[in-house]
Image (tube, coloured by chain):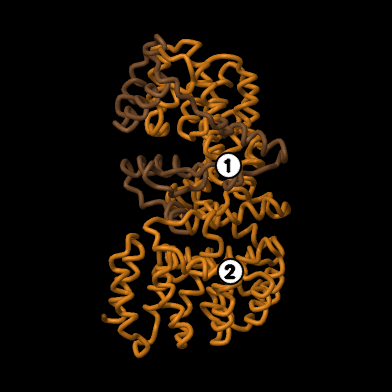
Amino acid sequence: VLSDLGDNCAIVEAAISNNSMLNLIRSFISHAFKALGIRETSPAPQSIFELIVSQVGQDPNWQIDESQFPKIRVSDESELSFAAGAMDAVLRGLRSQIKTARPLKTSFQALTTA
Amino acid sequence: MITEWKQIEAKLHGIRAIACVDSVLEDITRSGIAFKAVRLFWAMAKRSSNYEVIKWGIAIGTLSGDGEEKLHDLLIFARHPEFTLYSGYAIRRLATAMPELKRYLGELLPVSKQWGVIKLIEQIVRESDLIQDVDVQRKVLIFGMENNDGIPMEVAFTIAENIDLSRFVHLAETDTRVYVAIVQLMETLITEPNPLGGIDELPDGEALLEEYVRMLTKRPSDVRMLCALREMEEYLTTREPTKHGPTELLLQVRQLWEKNFDDSVLRVGLKNSDTRWRTLNLIEKLRIVSLLPEVREAFHQNPDYPSISVLAEIGTVEDLSLLLASVSRLVNMRDRAGKEISPINIPVTESKGALEYGRIVEALGRLATPEAIAHLKFAASDYDPTVRRSACKAFARMPLDKVDPEIASLIHQRLNDPLAYVRESAKEATAKLVL
């Protein structure tokens, strides 16, 4: 991304080069659509930032109501949702477990089974 | 050449920020980044609907530009627990030039929940000048415990390691809000040492336990205290049995229990919505059947998981029949019947009543009437894997003479369930029923 912008951030490029073939195909299709002059006709969906702003605007003490937001996907193949923020915690937890060999997080199990 | 944020979004799709954002930021610190790139990343953060892409946007989009304007938006992003970690990190980075911004991290505590408050506290404790402030410590303790939404084990040790716990244990003698938070914190350190650490990992754990018990002696009796004493008793009994009998602290805990335990304390606890689940939990653990009439009343008022669990565990046959009859109040059976077996867990937001229903299903093995068995057979093929597991658990509790070939066949089917924990329950049922 940044090299396209004229910058030099090798690590971002490396991360992007690890991306799946699916994303390359998706990108290709997107470019092809643009080249053919095809544009999305449906209105742009509301961004997550706008959703948060509107919820906080209605109630300054608002605490997240997950049903108002897009589902958090574990992967493209699964619709499984997690409590907001849990995915990062679990992934980070799993990374540290590799180092410390701690038992699996009980809360992760609770989240996936409850 | 990239000129629009959507192009970056497309290229970043599917790349999880948490996996490599630290390395990317480290590299950018060395090699630098153009202002226009930062601007596009920030635009992407504010306009995308993709969680992972937004995280990249927050991380890279705040590397330069108008700090105060971005702070305002970061405080909004931080309200969603998916972004609290990234926003907190970005605010701390902005605060290297404007240290006064750090206070905003503390101000987010009352409005952050579950993983949000946990990630926020992890950021706050890394700012030594911030966490040294007693008011910040108080907020960290209170909101860390009040807002963790059922996962205190993910934050209790972080709090215990970073605040002057002894001071707050002392304060809990007279400050009830601090008392409530301290009891939950200590309870977690004692009973849930994973994944972060528990009382044994704290350098002054032993002294802390003594201070904690001393504080409890100065409080009026309530359900929280009874729970705390019971947990302490279990912990001290199993920790290290000594040749010379129970330690002085253990004897003190037992004396305190004798002095404070009374059915009337539990009755008061049942009437308070904050302590209701604790009370029910204690009644179930101690199998206090004398309080079953009050539990039934609590169940009729609100058929929630803890009241169902008590009746399921220590209730009479009439109670179990009552639970079976209440299923239609909790879930829509006709709706369930039309759904195919799900190979994945059902999102919490889409499984209202399933936890309670599963607990009832589990109890039906103890009831084992023809009606209960018929329901169990139905539940064994429920679309929700947690209910299928409950059915297997119920089968395992059934008297052997009630197990017919259809039940055996259903258990065998569950041995091939898509979910491992259902297969495991089916395996246990097979072993117990010798199928």
Is residue B256 visible in this depiction of the protein? no
Task: Give the residue displayed 45% in from the left and 33% down from the top.
Answer: B52
Nearest to the observer: residue A107 or residue A82: A82
Amino acid at dot 2: Leu
Say which element carries label 2: helix
Task: Give the residue displayed 37% in from the left and 29% down from the top.
Answer: B20
Circle nearer the viewer, 1 or 2 = 2
Left or right of B433, for residue A71 = right
Is residue B170 visible in this depiction of the protein? yes
Disc 1 from disc 2: Cα separation? 31 Å
Q: Which mark is residue B330?
A: 2
Picture colour for chain A: brown
- The chain that hosts pointer 1 is B
Q: Position of residue B156 (x, y in %)?
A: 53, 48
Mark earlier in primary sequence (1, 2): 1
Vertical comparison of B134 with B7: above or below: below
Q: How many marks?
A: 2
Amino acid at dot 1: Val
Left or right of B232, for residue A21 = left
Nearest to the observer: residue B101 or residue A16: A16
Q: Badge 1: few (under 14), some or many (20 or more) residues near its Cα, within 10 Å?
A: many
Q: Position of residue B33 (x, y in %)?
A: 44, 12
Task: Give the residue displayed 54% in from the left and 76% down from the top.
Answer: B286
Co-location on one chain, circles 1 and 2: yes
Q: Badge 2: few (under 14), some or many (20 or more) residues near its Cα, within 10 Å?
A: some
Quarter of the image for the N terminus of chain A: give it: top left
Q: Residue B300: which quarter of the image?
A: bottom right
Q: Which residue is mark 1?
A: B117
Vertical comparison of A109 with B295: above or below: above
Picture colour for chain B: orange
